[in-house]
Amino acid sequence: MSEVVIETRNLTKRFSRGEQTVTALRDANLEVRRGDFLALMGPSGSGKSTLLHLIAAMDRPTSGEIRVLGQDLARMSDGEIARWRNAHIGFVFQSFNLIPVLTALENVELPLKLTRLSKAKRLEHARRALELVGLADRLRHTPRQLSGGQEQRVAIARAIVTDPDLILADEPTGNLDANSARDALTLLSRLNQEFGKTIVMVTHDPHAARAARYVRYLEKGELLPDGQKPEDW
């Protein structure tokens, strides 16, 4: 049986809004093994993005335990987390989060600037990542010169350029047309099947979820048991 790379126990996240406390995630128990492709589904506000951000150490839990790639994230300092995330996590955002004044090649190079690679090596890795996502002819284009589907492929190239252990995708098809969404999902499936990348993807779209190997549902901050769906789905 493959290695467990994500493990949560009673993971809970609460936010304060004025005098009110909102529980975004309650007692979530999850295991993800190396090579899995998991889709987290649920309506807006169900807690799926909160869970993804906790896995990426972009936020800290209120209570409970979370271990990712053998690391107890709750015990790591902010500096340790930043270095660990850059080395092990590739994040794909719904809004792409590309820097408008940089070319595709420069955007993909960015995560490598935190490594000890030379400029020439950084650009070589960035070029290979863009070739992998089918954008070898768009290296010098800025985001405004690209279609939405091409922007998302640049974002995926940026997520994989450090050869991360985990790819985390938050609504990666949310801003794409049907054809571009299909291309992005095909690319994620290829990264999982051909390159063995472990992927956790948040989506509310059943068509997108079909790209994953299995699905877990969230409802009102609760991660439902494996195989269980919300009543109105």
Image: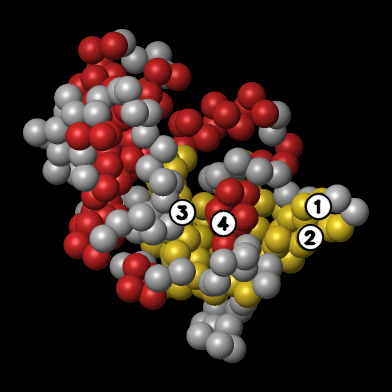
Q: Amino acid at mark 2?
A: Val
* Residue ID at (40%, 18%): 113
Q: Does label 3 or label 1 sit earlier along the sequence?
A: 1
Secondary element at image label 4? helix
Q: Amino acid at mark 4?
A: Ser
Residue 33: image location, x then y, percent: 47, 59
- Outermost left residue: 137
Q: Amino acid at mark 1?
A: Arg
Q: Amino acid at mark 3?
A: Asp
Secondary element at image label 3? strand
Mark 4 → mark 1, Cα distance in angstroms: 18 Å
Label 3 or label 2, whichever lies nearer to me, is 2
Residue 170 is tagged as 3
Q: Does label 4 or label 1 sit earlier along the sequence?
A: 1
Residue 5: image location, x then y, percent: 52, 52
The residue singled out by tag 4 in the image is 49
Q: Are marks 4 and 2 in contact (CB under 8 Å)?
A: no
220 with respect to 191 (left or right): right
Mark 3 → mark 2, Cα distance in angstroms: 21 Å
The residue singled out by tag 1 in the image is 17
